[in-house]
C-alpha cells in the first residue's frame, strides 16, 4: 500500500490555502497526494460553452444537484465540482469578519464563542488577501494591520451619499474582483456575470498563480472520489477512494478533507466518526433584496458589480436579541420601467446572520456517496433581525431622496455551506479544535466553512482560507 506524508481531498479554497502553507514548511522530500473527485474544466472552455461553442467538457464534472439528496427543495445549496471547486463560480465578495463575530457568547450571550479570535487570525487574513489580490478601502469597520493589495473599487452615486453620511459604516466592498490588472487577471468591467467572469477579473484557483498543484512534491489524482477514512481510536489510518470504478486505499501520516461542508461531513459519517455533532448544525445566512425608488436621482457608476457594504445594522447590543445585518449595494443593470426614471433606482441585498440548529443537518443517504441534506428554516433570531431592518431602513435611507422601498422574496440561498463540523474549544461542543484538527482523530484536518462556530452575515471564503493558512502554519 502506498504511504504519504499528507493526503488532501479536494482542490477548492480550503485545500489550496492549506497546501500552500504546508508546502512552505514541508521538507524537500515530502510526499503529498491530492485526491480530486472532478477534473480541470478550464475557464476558457467554460466561456466557450457559454457562447454556445461546445467545448465538449461541460459534462466532465457532475452537476452539484446530482451529488446529494436535498430533503428541502425550497432551500438551495449550490457549488461547483471539479478542480478549483466553487472558486470557478463564486462572485468574489471578501469582507472580513468583525472581532465580535468570534465572541457571540461572551459578548452577547448568544450561541458559542469561536476557539480562535480575530487577533490570532489577523495575519492570516492579511496573507489570504494578498494571495487573492483583494481590492479594498483604507478605512474599514474591522481592524487591519496591512493595506489591501489593490485600490478600492469606486462608488456608485448612491454609495457616495451613504458613505458621506455613515463614514466607515458604508465602505467600498473588499473584493477578489480586481480593480486593476494583476497577474493573469484583468480589471473588473462590471458585467455582473461573475459565475463565469468573461475577463478573468475575479480570483480563482486556476488563475491564482499559487504554485501548489505543480509542486514536485505533490501528486495529483483526478477523478478520485473519496468515500471514507479508516479511523482507529485517536488516528485516521487510511483513505478510501473510487477511481475508474476501482476502490483503492492509501495510508498517510496526516489527512486533510477539503471537500466542502456537505461532503466533509458525509465522508466522516461514512467513516463511523464517533463525534455526536458531526453533520449537525448545517446553515448559512438569510437574504433578500430591498429595491428603492429614488426621486430625481440618477444612480450610476461604481467600478464593480457589488460596490459597497453597509454595517449600520451589523454590530451592537441588539445582537443579544436579534441578528446582525450586512448590506450590499450593487449596480446590476436593472432599470425602472418609467420614462425619464430608468436609473432612479437602488438595489440593496440585506444579509442576516443565522444560528446553528441541530435539526439542520447532513446525514448518510441510501447511497453513501449521496448524502441527505436537511434544512428546516432560519432561526427566530434571524427573523427578528429582518423585522428590525424593515423598521429601521426608512430612517437609515432618509439621506437619499427615497420614493418607496419594496422588499423582494428571500433568496433560496446565499450560496454558502456552513457549520457541519463546528469548531469549539470544548470537545463536547464542537467537532474540531482551533487548528481545524478533529478533536478525536488528531491527524485529521477538516477544512472549510463547515468549521464555522456561528454564521456571521459575511461571505465565508476569505475567512475559511485564512483558517486553512493558520491551521497549516500552527500544526507543522
Ligand atoms: C454562485 C456562488 C457564488 C459565491 N460567491 C461567494 C462570494 O462572493 N464570496 C464568498 O466568500 N463565497 C462565495 N461563495 C461560496 C464559496 O464559493 C465557498 O465558500 C468556497 O468555494 C468553499 O471552498 P471549499 O474549498 O471549502 O469547497 P469547494 O469550493 O466546494 O471545493 C470542494 C472541492 O472538493 C472536491 N470534492 C468534493 N467531494 C469530493 C470527494 N468526495 N472526493 C474528492 N474530492 C471531492 C470538489 O470537486 C472541489 O474541488 C459562492 C458560492 C457559489 C456557489
Ligand atoms: S463584475 Fe464582471 S468583470 Fe467583474 S468579476 Fe464579475 S463578471 Fe468579472
Image (cartoon, rainbow, N blue to C red):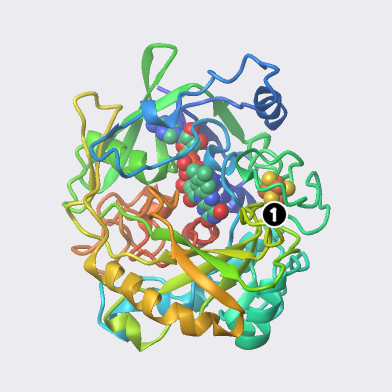
Q: Is mark 1 within 8 Å of ligand 2?
A: yes
Q: Quadrant of the N terminus?
A: top left
Dividing the picture into quarters, in which one does residue 100 lie?
Answer: bottom left
Q: Residue at x 74, y 42 (%)?
A: 200
Q: Residue furthest front?
A: 339
Q: Quadrant of residue 60?
A: top right
The x and y percentages for residue 141 are 57, 81
Q: Is residue 313 placed above or below 16 in the rendered structure? A: below
Asked whether residue 202 appears in the rendered view, the answer is no
Residue at 68% x, 32% y: name it. 43
Query: Which of the 4 quarters of the picture holds residue 75?
Result: top left
SS assignment at label 1: loop
Which of these two is toward me, 406 or 137? Answer: 406
Near-viewer residue (207 or 172): 172
Position of 10 relative to 151 (above/below): above
Say above or below: 391 vs 272.
below
Q: Is residue 269 left or right of residue 446?
A: left
| 306 on left or right of 80 | right
Q: Nearer the viewer, residue 146 or 30?
A: 146
- Front one among 145 and 287: 287
Give left or right: position of 401 versus 253: right
Q: x%, y% of residue 103?
A: 36, 78
Whether residue 128 is visible = yes
User: Label 1: which residue?
Assistant: 177
Image location (x, y in percent) of residue 316 = 40, 86
Q: State the image coordinates of residue 249 (x, y, percent, origin top left).
A: 36, 24
Q: Residue furthest top?
A: 245
**Classed neighbour count for the residue bearing mark 1: other residues with Cα under 10 Å, few (<14), some (14–19), many (≥20):** many
**Horizontal side of residue 74 vs 169, given as left or right:** left
Amino acid at each position: 500500500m502506498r504511504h504519504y506524508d499528507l493526503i488532501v481531498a479536494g482542490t477548492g479554497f480550503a485545500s489550496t490555502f492549506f497546501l500552500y502553507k504546508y508546502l512552505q514548511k514541508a521538507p524537500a522530500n515530502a510526499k503529498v497526494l491530492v485526491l480530486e473527485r472532478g477534473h480541470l474544466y478550464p475557464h476558457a472552455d467554460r466561456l466557450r460553452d457559454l457562447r454556445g461553442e461546445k467545448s465538449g467538457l461541460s459534462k466532465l464534472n457532475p452537476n452539484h444537484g446530482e451529488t446529494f439528496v436535498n430533503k428541502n427543495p425550497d432551500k438551495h445549496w449550490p457549488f461547483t465540482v471539479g478542480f478549483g471547486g466553487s472558486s470557478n463560480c463564486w462572485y468574489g465578495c471578501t469582507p472580513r469578519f468583525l472581532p465580535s463575530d468570534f465572541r457571540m457568547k461572551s459578548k452577547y450571550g448568544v450561541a458559542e464563542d469561536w476557539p480562535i479570535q480575530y487577533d490570532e487570525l489577523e495575519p492570516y487574513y492579511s496573507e489570504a488577501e494578498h494571495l487573492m489580490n483583494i481590492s479594498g478601502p483604507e478605512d474599514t469597520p474591522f481592524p487591519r494591520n496591512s493595506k489591501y493589495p489593490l485600490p478600492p473599487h469606486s462608488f456608485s452615486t448612491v454609495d457616495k451619499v451613504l458613505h458621506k453620511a455613515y463614514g466607515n459604516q458604508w465602505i467600498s466592498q473588499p473584493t477578489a474582483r480586481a480593480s486593476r490588472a494583476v497577474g493573469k487577471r484583468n480589471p473588473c468591467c462590471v458585467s455582473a456575470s461573475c459565475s463565469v467572469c468573461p475577463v478573468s477579473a475575479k480570483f480563482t484557483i486556476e488563475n491564482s498563480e499559487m504554485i501548489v498543484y505543480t509542486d514536485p512534491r505533490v501528486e495529483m489524482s483526478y477523478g478520485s472520489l473519496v468515500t471514507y477514512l479508516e479511523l482507529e481510536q485517536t488516528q485516521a489510518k487510511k483513505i478510501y477512494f473510487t477511481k475508474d470504478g476501482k476502490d483503492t486505499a492509501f495510508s498517510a501520516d496526516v489527512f486533510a478533507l477539503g471537500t466542502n461542508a456537505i461532503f466533509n461531513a458525509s465522508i466522516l459519517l461514512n467513516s463511523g466518526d464517533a463525534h455526536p455533532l458531526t453533520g449537525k448544525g448545517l446553515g448559512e445566512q438569510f437574504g433578500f433584496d430591498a429595491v428603492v425608488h429614488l426621486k430625481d436621482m440618477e444612480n450610476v457608476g461604481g467600478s464593480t458589480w457589488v460596490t459597497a457594504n453597509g454595517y449600520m445594522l451589523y454590530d451592537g447590543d441588539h445582537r443579544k436579541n436579534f441578528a446582525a445585518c450586512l448590506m450590499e449595494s450593487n449596480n446590476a443593470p436593472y432599470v425602472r420601467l418609467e420614462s425619464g426614471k430608468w436609473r432612479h433606482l437602488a438595489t440593496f441585498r440585506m444579509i442576516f446572520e443565522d444560528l446553528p440548529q441541530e435539526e439542520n443537518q447532513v446525514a448518510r443517504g441510501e447511497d453513501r456517496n449521496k448524502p441527505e441534506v436537511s434544512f428546516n428554516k432560519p432561526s427566530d433570531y434571524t427573523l427578528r433581525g429582518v423585522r428590525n431592518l424593515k423598521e429601521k431602513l426608512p430612517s437609515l435611507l432618509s439621506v437619499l431622496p427615497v420614493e418607496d422601498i419594496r422588499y423582494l422574496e428571500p433568496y433560496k440561498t446565499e450560496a454558502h455551506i456552513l457549520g457541519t463540523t463546528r469548531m469549539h474549544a470544548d470537545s463536547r461542543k464542537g467537532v474540531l479544535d482551533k487548528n481545524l484538527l478533529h478533536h478525536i482523530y488528531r491527524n485529521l484536518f477538516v477544512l472549510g466553512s463547515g468549521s464555522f462556530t456561528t454564521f456571521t452575515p459575511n461571505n465565508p471564503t476569505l475567512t475559511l482560507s485564512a483558517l486553512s493558512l493558520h491551521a497549516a502554519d500552527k500544526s507543522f
